[in-house]
Amino acid sequence: MTKLLQGKYFLVLLGVLSCGGKKTDQPPTPVPTAPLPTAGLAGQRVALTPLALVAAEDTLHWDAVIADRRATLNKSDSIIATLLTARAPEVTWVGPAELRHAARRAAGIAADPDQMGTPFLRGDKIIDVPDPLRYQLRTLVGLVGGRYAMIPAGLVYRRQPGKTDATAELSIVMVDTRVGKVGWRTVARGDGPDPWTALTRAVKSLTPGLP
């Protein structure tokens, strides 16, 4: 599995966009979504942590739609877990519900999966996961078996210039919990007239080649 920290996936992680030349008013071109590295994860148990951050630009006027934070996070978790399970069945995904159950059974040892500070990992230059998050992830994944954690680190909805639909931007990273390093990351994007359609299309972009 060390291959996950090498090659094109690691290059995606370490790539830095340089700013040079003349300034322009045009927004930067988004980096293409990197596909899930499912070949290296086939047959393994991978913890899928719950989402902890959802935000939307004020111009979308979605305050009422996502006002209930817990309900929004739960629905987002359901969409992500359902689609990954269906579209990447070669991986044994251990979803948020099972992680919460394992943490409750190990109260005092494992951290609450909803309170682990995973949005911190949205930073595109983060490679080493700091403590206490590193310890929390290693402990939780150890309880359910496996080595890797797939972490939806944040979901942001934006209104792109010239588009009527909103764009969902799902930041997602994979952490090797044994060494405490991010081995893969990407931002999945999808457009839609409502939060759930946009998120669905964003998650589908992680597995290109499927309808």
Image (cartoon, rainbow, N blue to C red):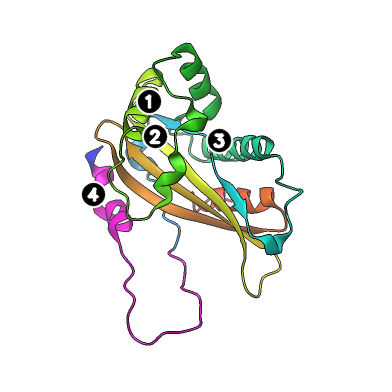
Q: In this orientation, which residue lies closer to the viewer: 36 or 153?
A: 153
Percent position (x, y) of residue 200? 62, 48
Q: Is residue 176 visible?
A: yes
Instruction: From the image, tell me which residue sits under label 4.
Output: 6
Q: Identify the mark nearer the N-term, 4 or 2.
A: 4
Disc 3 marks which amino acid? Ala
Q: Identify the mark nearer the N-term, 4 or 3.
A: 4
Q: Is residue 35 visible?
A: no
Classify mark 3: helix, strand or loop.
helix
Separation of residues labelled 2 and 3 (CA atoms): 13 Å
- For image coordinates 41% across by 55% down, the residue present is 34
Q: How many marks?
A: 4
Q: Which residues are magenta?
A: 3-31
Query: CB of mark 1 within 8 Å of CB of mark 3?
Result: no
Q: Identify the mark nearer the N-term, 1 or 2.
A: 1
Classify mark 1: helix, strand or loop.
helix
Percent position (x, y) of residue 33? 45, 58
Instruction: From the image, tell me which residue sits under label 2.
Output: 149
Query: CB of mark 1 within 8 Å of CB of mark 2?
Result: yes
Instruction: From the image, tell me which residue sits under label 1.
Output: 141
Instruction: From the image, tell me which residue sits under label 3.
Output: 81
Disc 1 marks which amino acid? Val
